[in-house]
Amino acid sequence: MDISTVNSLSYEDFVDTFGNVVERSPLIVAAIWPYRPFANLSDLEARISELIDSLPESGKEGILRCHPDLAGRDLQRGTLTRESQEEQSQAGMASLNPEETTRMYRLNTEYKRRFGFPFIICAKMNNKAAILRQLTERSGNSQTKERAHAIDEVKKICNLRLRNVVLPDIQNKL
Ligand SMILES: NC(=O)NC1NC(=O)NC1=O
């Protein structure tokens, strides 16, 4: 889809198309629809990023809590969103051995108990080993530092998801 098609979408179609670029948080794209026309993909990304940054800390943590655990309950039950299923599978989360599953569960549980939101990382930019390493390392962060880090990961996930739908400028011009 090119940017002019994006700019011509009704808000219903806009939310249907982009509603899950921030996991289970369609409110974000519903809120930026009035900023059309977007100049390009980067402009759209920047609007989403600014909107997230403008939220109070409770709102940012709310976004974080809408994310599923990595290799968690939703993956086991088959209730992940389509995007999350693809990302987690690509990072090897759907094919952990029993020991790795138990380790992941234990580390995720400890992380959630400490911070009050799930551990989030852009799965497509990482592999199993990097995810396990970061889960351990980031558990030592302060609440403020970790919340900011997690929001940065949400933005990376969002930007990759957007790129799956909207052609970058260079392709628009071909
Ligand atoms: N918890 C967590 O990081 N979830 C995710 N990361 C990602 O890239 N897709 C997800 O669902």
Image (spheres, grey):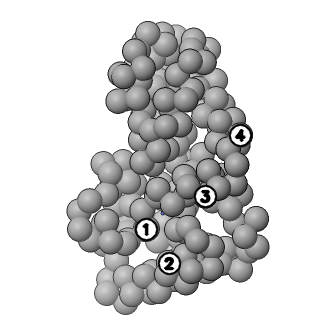
Mark 3 lies on residue? 61
Q: Which residue is tagged 1?
A: 70
Q: Are marks 3 and 4 in contact (CB under 8 Å)?
A: no
For the residues labelled 1 and 4, the Cα–Cα distance comes to: 27 Å
Q: Nearer the viewer, mark 3 or mark 2?
A: 3
Q: Earlier in the sequence, mark 3 or mark 4?
A: 4
Q: Residues within 10 Å of mark 2 (few under 14, many from 20)?
A: many
Q: Are marks 1 and 4 in contact (CB under 8 Å)?
A: no
Which residue appears at 56% of the width and 80% of the height? 113
Dot 3 falls on a residue whose secondary structure is helix
Q: Secondary structure at mark 2?
A: helix
Measured Cα–Cα span from mark 2 to mark 1? 8 Å
Q: Which residue is tagged 2?
A: 108
Q: Is mark 1 within 8 Å of ligand 1?
A: yes
Residue 135 seen by the camera: no
Residue in the image at 70% along x and 66% along y? 146
Closer to us: mark 4 or mark 2? 4
Residue sitting farthest toward the left: 78
The tag earlier along the polypeptide, 4 or 2, is 4
Q: Is residue 97 above or below residue 154?
A: below
- Amino acid type, callout 4: Ser
The quadrant of the picture occupied by the N terminus is top left
